Image: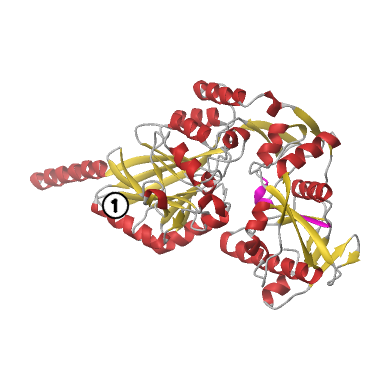
Amino acid sequence: MKKIILTLLILSISFTLYSQDNIKEVTILHWNDLHARNLPYKISKKDSATGKSIYYYVGGTSSILGYLNKFRNKSSLVLNAGDDFQGTPISTLTRGRSQIELLNLFGLDAFVLGNHEFDYGQYALDSALQLAKFDYLSANIFYEPKHSTFGKSYVIKNINGVMIGIIGITEPDLPKGTLPKNINEVIMLNTDSIISVNIRELKKAQCNLIILLTHEGVEADKLVAEKFHKDIDVIVGGHSHTPLFRPFIDSGVVIVQAGCWGRWLGELNLKVDIIKDTISGYYGKLIETIFDSTIYDRQAEQKVEGMIASIGKDMLKVIGELKSDWKASYSKESNLGQFEADMFRERTGTDIAFINGGGLRKSLANGDITVSDIWEINPFGNDIETFSVSGSMLEQMLINHIRLKMIEQEQQGAGEILDVSGMTYTFNSKKIEEDSLNTEISITFSGQPLDRNKMYSIATNSFVTSQFVNFFGEFPAKPEFKTTGLIDRDIIIDAVKMLKTIDSPLEKRIIDLSGN
């Protein structure tokens, strides 16, 4: 009897030791869509007790790196899900080189190319990436001049005894995410096929864990999870600027994303069974990178300050005062979008002006307005172009736009708005949803109804005209676009200098009678 008990005890201890050796811990530290917000920036939130706005600083390269170093250990895997380029003057003036130099400070395990990495053109990106001291990925982007993918398709990292394969996937609709001229020697490969091929390679390499590092948005990540849930374990994503405060689980795949602009650092703690090649437990959260003098990285701060100094003091010059916060929005009308559309229309003398919500990259709290603020709001430096259409074509353009926005909303969780100046329009999205042939829309100009036979002049930026079909639908012939020689941010800088003090309340110019 004693021998049996002793044997069982030995087996129990052996099993426990085996089980403990079997389970390894990995912590993924991740962020995405910094958009060159290298300096801490001010945000506000409502105090629950007083209802008043509280302002404080978050983000910036030095804070992100400081928080990263605070939580990094031997079990850490450090990932960036793209769009580090484009958003501030230093990124534009250095054509992305500033961001590669700063990313070199982080000890990155992998970085996936986002659509905005291509905003300065494919050649500028290729040149900037020569400075990279980290692995950058792009399994589904083929670069014709080099006859290869733009970055590695995947990398394998050994983290705390866990073999981890990481596949990099960029937004498949890259041609919609940047100007066509920026990627005229790029071919987008079939994403599903590429993922399948690379999964096979990682399995051959006996990886315990397979991660997709993606820049395509949460909704697209969910679809990928449903297709490949038998093979992939985690998706670390970007592009949709979604702060997932807790991991989202789809078909057993753990999906995470850390918002945007460096406000949050994502932390995903995993327990990995290296015998079964499965995740046996996980816990994830977002850490707000509130500026803390005991945490931020001084070396990174000095490097950023040196870069800012190199572009001149003119960028920091105060040119006006903002009385009420400017709020940017991708999918809803915003006072910032309306203000800019008003300025475009006034400067060009057109009847109407449009600006796409996704082109406005920063909200701004009340207070001083600097030249740099306007660059950060309008980082792309798009040309302003004009064109004319008949009232009947304008009506169809808006009907198409409403439908396309609703489709994007359904597929991706948010549809891009076109803020408008010079007119208002009213529609009912519920009726359009119920009846695809519904064309009920009411357009007015200072209270006067649309004249279908009249020609209306329109001003907008070159991104909207280059993506005319995606915003307004197909027509037998596109309008003739004429360049004005004006740059979007230059118009806004001039307007702020002239007005000095700005208070721009939000108006209702686009009215959905359904209440959606």
Secondary structure category for the residue under label 1: helix
Task: Look at 37% across and 53% down and name the residue there.
Answer: 233
Residue 355 is at least partly visible in this image: no
* Vertical position of residue 202 compared to residue 57: above or below: below
* Vertical position of residue 183 compared to residue 293: above or below: below
What segment is highlighted magenta in the picture?
A: 351-360
Image location (x, y in percent) of residue 293 = 57, 21
Task: Look at 41% across and 64% down and name the residue there.
Answer: 227
Query: Is 448 colored magenta in this rendering?
Result: no
375 left or right of 123 in image: right
Task: Look at 62% across and 36% down and name the residue there.
Answer: 88
Question: Which one is nearer the viewer's eye here, 145 or 130?
Answer: 145
Task: Look at 74% across and 70% down and name the residue there.
Answer: 396
Image location (x, y in percent) of residue 514 = 75, 67
Query: Is 357 colored magenta in this rendering?
Result: yes
Image location (x, y in percent) of residue 25 = 34, 40
Question: Which one is nearer the viewer's eye here, 77 or 287?
Answer: 77
Q: Which residue is mark 1?
A: 202
Residue 136 is at least partly visible in this image: yes
How many dots with numbers? Answer: 1
Question: Which one is nearer the viewer's eye here, 303 or 351?
Answer: 351
Image location (x, y in percent) of residue 383 = 69, 48
Quadrant (top left/top right/bottom left/bottom right) for the C terminus: bottom right
51 left or right of 268 in image: right
The amino acid type of the residue labelled 1 equals Leu
User: Label 1: few (<14), some or many (≥20) within 10 Å?
Assistant: many
